[in-house]
Image (cartoon, helix red, strand yellow):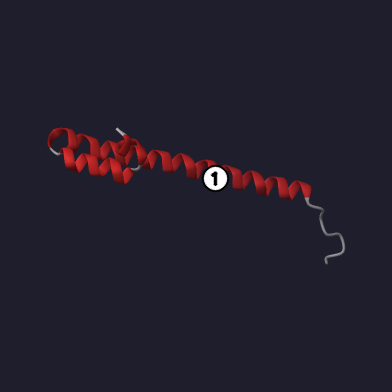
């Protein structure tokens, strides 16, 4: 079970090694879960970036003399 849980490459390798119906069912599920996790990570990263911009705009002093 270690290679399946360790990485997408390991899981796809196991799916290819198993072959047949189980391998054909495992590969697309692995890819779907990987993309789902990647989407979540990108959404969290974007939210953190937006929060940083908002905090910077609110916390940094404005320029009064155009300098």
12, 1: nearer the viewer: 1
63, 1: nearer the viewer: 1
58, 27: nearer the viewer: 27
16 is higher (above) or lower (below) than 1: below
In the rendered picture of this protein, how many numbered marks are placed on residues?
1
Q: Residue at x 86, y 59 (%)?
A: 64
Q: Does 20 sit left or right of 25 as displayed?
A: left
Name the residue carrying label 1: 45
Q: Residue furthest right?
A: 65
Where's the N terminus, which quadrant? Answer: top left
For the residue labelled by badge 1, is the local secondary structure a helix, a strand or a loop? Answer: helix
Where's the C terminus, which quadrant? Answer: bottom right
- Neighbour tally class for label 1: few under 14, some 14-19, many 20 plus, Cα within 10 Å: few
Q: Residue furthest left?
A: 20
Q: Does 54 sit left or right of 7 as displayed?
A: right
Percent position of residue 14, x then y: 23, 40
Percent position of residue 3, x then y: 30, 39
Q: Residue at x 42, y 39 (%)?
A: 37
Percent position of residue 12, x then y: 26, 43
Q: Residue at x 39, y 38 (%)?
A: 36
Q: Residue furthest front?
A: 2
Q: Does 52 sit left or right of 9 as displayed?
A: right
Q: Residue at x 18, y 37 (%)?
A: 23
């Amino acid at each position: 079970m270690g290679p399946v849980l360790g990485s997408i490459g390991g899981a796809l390798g196991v799916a290819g090694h198993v072959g047949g119906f189980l391998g054909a069912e495992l590969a697309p599920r692995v890819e779907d879960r990987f993309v789902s996790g990647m989407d979540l990570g990108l959404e969290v990263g974007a939210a953190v970036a937006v929060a940083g911009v908002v905090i910077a705009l609110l916390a940094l002093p404005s320029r009064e003399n155009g300098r």
